[in-house]
Amino acid sequence: MKSMNVTLNLSMDYPFVIHTPLMWLDKAQTWKMADDLGAFDYVRERTLTCYNGVIGDGCGECPACKLRKAGLDRYVQQRAAAESAGVDVR
């Protein structure tokens, strides 16, 4: 990403920065951020990760769907554990 940013800046008339904040988060952290922002259901139901173009939970078979589901399952499990321990997760 840094190399792409440098290359693009060399070819442009003005400087700019490409921000990639999700690049440093795992899928469970990304789900937590969506939940913290009040967008959990929107992201779960209306976004696309699937290589086969299936919106929401996807096809469940491609690598992207498996990664998304694993992150979602891990986050939901962490949230349930925190809630059962009486920790305010939101």
Image: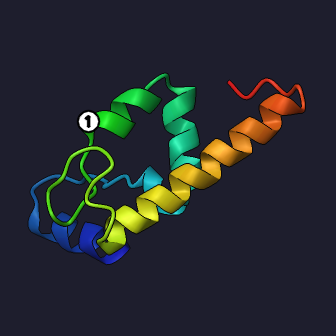
Residue 53 vs residue 39, the one in the foreground: 53
Quadrant where the image shows the C terminus: top right
Quadrant where the image shows the N terminus: bottom left
Q: Residue at x 27, y 54 (%)?
A: 58
Q: Is residue 26 left or right of residue 42?
A: right
**Residue 25 appears in the picture as rendered:** no
Q: What scheme was used to colour the molecule?
A: rainbow
Residue extending farthest right: 85
Q: Residue at x 33, y 49 (%)?
A: 57
**Residue 74 appears in the picture as rendered:** yes
Q: Residue at x 34, y 67 (%)?
A: 64
Instruction: Name the element at disc 1.
Output: helix
Q: Is residue 63 left or right of residue 55?
A: right
Q: Residue 47, position in %: x, y?
A: 27, 42
Above/below status of 75 relative to 88: below
* Quadrant of the image occupied by residue 7: bottom left
Around disc 1, counting alpha carbons within 10 Å, would you say few (fewer than 14), some (14 to 19), or many (20 or more)?
few
Above/below status of 86 relative to 61: above
List the residue tagged with mark 1. Answer: 46
Q: Is residue 10 left or right of residue 31?
A: left
Q: Is residue 10 left or right of residue 80?
A: left
Q: Residue 53, position in %: x, y?
A: 14, 57
Above/below status of 5 relative to 77: below
* Quadrant of the image occupied by residue 56: top left
Amino acid at the residue labelled 1: Arg
Count the labels in the image.
1
Residue extending farthest front: 60
Q: Residue at x 10, y 68 (%)?
A: 11
* Quadrant of the image occupied by residue 3: bottom left
